[in-house]
Image (cartoon, helix red, strand yellow):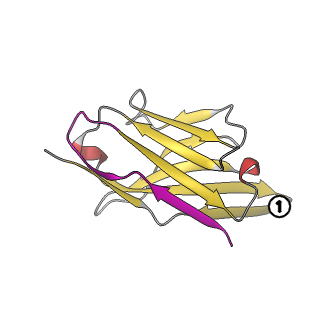
Amino acid sequence: QVQLVESGGGLVQPGGSLRLSCAASGFTFSNYAMNWYRQAPGKERELVAAISSTGGSTNHAGSVKGRFTISRDNAKNTVYLQMHSLKPEDTAVYYCNAQRLAYGNKYNYWGQGTQVTVSS
């Protein structure tokens, strides 16, 4: 059974930091690219950061570049999102996503999300 379980969200003041974690199980984690998405109320889900299966390549959305860092530990089947200098506009539900394209098939798994609220 595939599971992606996010943790680490919460309420933080502007300028603060949080680290999100996503623990994966039920599939071969090291074969999958991993992504963090977020969705704010009334807005579409957007890609925040992505990391390749080996961790050798990362990308971050322009709105978070220099403040957020995605990383992964394939030995622990976990992907992280370190967030610094948080702003009220970072408030959203953050989702972990696993993707793989193999043999013409696309595999796409989602976590349940974790709420991040940035407010004074």
Q: Position of residue 92 (x, y in %)?
A: 33, 55
In the picture of the structure, the residue carrying the numbered disc 1 is: 104
Q: Where is residue 68 in the image (x, y as percent from the top left)?
A: 42, 34
Q: Where is residue 22 in the image (x, y as percent from the top left)?
A: 53, 53
Q: In this view, does 22 lie to the left or right of 115?
A: right
Residue 4 lies within the magenta run: yes
Which residue is at 32% across, 57% downward? Answer: 40
Residue 117 lies within the magenta run: no
Q: What element carries label 1?
A: loop
Which residue is at 41% across, 26% downward? Answer: 66
The amino acid type, in three-letter code, at marker 1 is Gly
Which residue is at 69% across, 31% downward? Answer: 56
Disc tally is: 1
Q: Is residue 94 left or right of residue 101?
A: left
The picture quadrant where one finds residue 89 is: top left
Pointer 1: residues within 10 angstroms few (<14), some, or many (20+)?
Answer: few
The N terminus lies in quadrant: bottom right
Which residue is at 71% across, 65% downward? Answer: 26
Is 14 located above or below residue 3 in the figure? above
Is 9 located above or below residue 108 in the figure? above
From which residue to which does the magenta span run?
Answer: 1-17
The picture quadrant where one finds residue 99 is: bottom right
Residue lying at the far right of the rendered structure: 103
